[in-house]
Image (cartoon, rainbow, N blue to C red):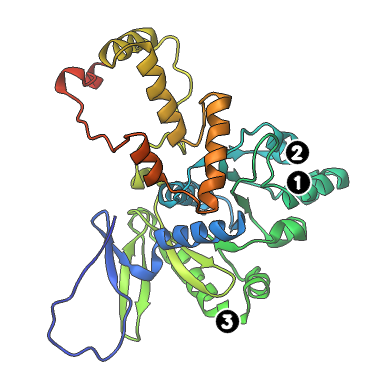
């Protein structure tokens, strides 16, 4: 969580300066917050349902890692559950089949490198991709959902114009050859920040592992970042204005996230015994029926509804009444004598994870 550093000086303030805050005990400039970017995108998705975000920069400039971090922050901050899916070339070229394979849910879809489109995709494939993108939030077999689409590429002119359309843009690298193209994309007012990003990116690599980059605070002062400890600089545009932001790796924010990086099937040669886990799980929490109910709740947290068709239909039925404000959940809870449950995991039921 970010924390503001409050100055207790009694001197009158003569000039407003960027506020320095802390994120996980690491100092940063408040206006550089990636969490603020995440919140903007969440807010846009509440209005538009489909949000497109472009990530532009050369290889090894941090596009992919920033996609992962931003996706993580979005699904943590959003009031509705998002699933995160990362796709490659084949899934994009067959976008219609890719979307048809998804279960109805809200998604953050990451296409890491789409620069191949102009060179590799046929006109028929490009036309199909354009058609699917125009209706991407209408998944087969379910209601309309929210889609946040991340697209990564190296150069603006390497992809068809319709793919460049977006509500937000994050740039991870810049050089003299593409400043004109970026200025055309973002507007002339973005030029000072484009040049600043160029400077910060050079600083962040010029001394190897000891590199720092310095953000100017007024005419004489600056704020120093140690590159990759944990931040790197980027330029963010929301279509109205541009600003410098900094981003860490997703693992710095949270080491483990089953939404962003779900566990794969266990290695059959691993020491962990899944069957023993199930037996222990069921015995500690009231049998197979309770265990199944617990797993359903866990799936629901990830945006996967595993309840019966009748229950899902009932939810849609209630949703219609809630949307029209004819009833509210508090009324329903009171009628069925339901209230929040507070419980602690007893020490006798805690897993011995150090033995796994």
Above or below residue 95? Residue 134 is below
The quadrant where residue 276 appears: top left
Q: Position of residue 198 (x, y in %)?
A: 51, 69
Q: Counting other residues with Cα less than 10 Å from the Cα at mark 3, is it few (<14), some (14-19), or many (20 or more)?
A: few
Quadrant including the N terminus: bottom left
Residue 156 tag number: none
What element does badge 1 sit on?
Answer: helix
Q: Which residue is at a point 64% across and 61% down the rendered structure image?
A: 166
C-alpha span from label 3 to label 1: 34 Å
Q: Could one spot residue 52 in this view of the protein?
A: no
Q: Residue at x 37, y 24 (%)?
A: 294
State how far apart marks 1 and 2 are (Cα): 6 Å
Q: Which mark is residue 132?
A: 1
**Tag 1: Cα neighbours inside 10 Å, few (<14), some, or many (≥20)?**
some
Between the residue at mark 3 and the residue at mark 2, the CA separation in whole angstroms equals: 38 Å
Q: Which residue is mark 2?
A: 96
x then y, percent, for residue 112: 60, 45
Give 97 or 155, whichever is nearer the viewer: 97
Residue 76, percent across and down?
41, 47
Nearer-N-terminus badge (1/2): 2
């Amino acid at each position: 969580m970010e924390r503001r550093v409050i100055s207790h000086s009694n001197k009158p303030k003569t000039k407003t300066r960027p506020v320095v805050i802390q994120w996980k005990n690491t100092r940063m400039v408040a206006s550089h917050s990636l969490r603020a970017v995440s919140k903007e995108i969440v807010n846009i998705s509440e209005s538009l349902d489909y949000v497109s975000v472009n990530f532009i920069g050369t290889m090894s400039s941090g596009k992919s890692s920033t996609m992962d971090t931003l996706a993580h922050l979005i699904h943590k901050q959003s009031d509705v559950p998002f699933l995160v899916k990362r796709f490659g070339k084949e899934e994009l070229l067959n976008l219609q089949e890719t979307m048809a394979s998804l279960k109805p849910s809200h998604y953050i879809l990451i296409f890491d490198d789409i620069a191949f489109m102009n060179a590799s995709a046929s006109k028929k494939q490009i036309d199909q991709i354009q058609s699917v993108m125009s209706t991407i939030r209408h998944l087969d077999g379910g209601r309309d959902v929210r889609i946040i689409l991340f697209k990564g590429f190296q150069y603006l002119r390497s992809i068809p114009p319709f793919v460049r359309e977006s509500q937000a843009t994050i740039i991870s690298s810049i050089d003299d050859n593409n400043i004109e193209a970026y200025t055309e994309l973002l507007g002339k007012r973005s030029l000072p920040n484009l040049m600043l990003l160029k400077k910060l990116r050079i600083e962040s690599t010029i001394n190897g592992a000891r590199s720092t980059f310095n953000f100017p605070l007024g005419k004489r002062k600056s704020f120093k970042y140690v590159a990759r400890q944990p931040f790197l600089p980027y330029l963010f545009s929301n279509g109205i204005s541009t600003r410098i932001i900094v981003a860490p790796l997703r693992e710095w924010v949270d080491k483990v996230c089953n939404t962003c990086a779900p566990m794969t099937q266990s290695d059959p040669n691993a020491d962990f015994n899944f069957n023993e886990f199930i037996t222990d799980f069921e015995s500690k929490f009231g049998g197979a029926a309770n265990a199944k109910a617990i797993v359903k709740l866990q799936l629901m947290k990830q945006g996967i509804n595993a309840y019966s068709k009748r229950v899902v239909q009932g939810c849609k039925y209630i949703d219609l009444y809630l949307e029209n404000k004819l009833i509210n959940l508090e009324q329903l809870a009171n009628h069925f004598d339901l209230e929040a449950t507070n419980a602690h995991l007893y020490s006798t039921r805690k897993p011995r994870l150090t033995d796994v």
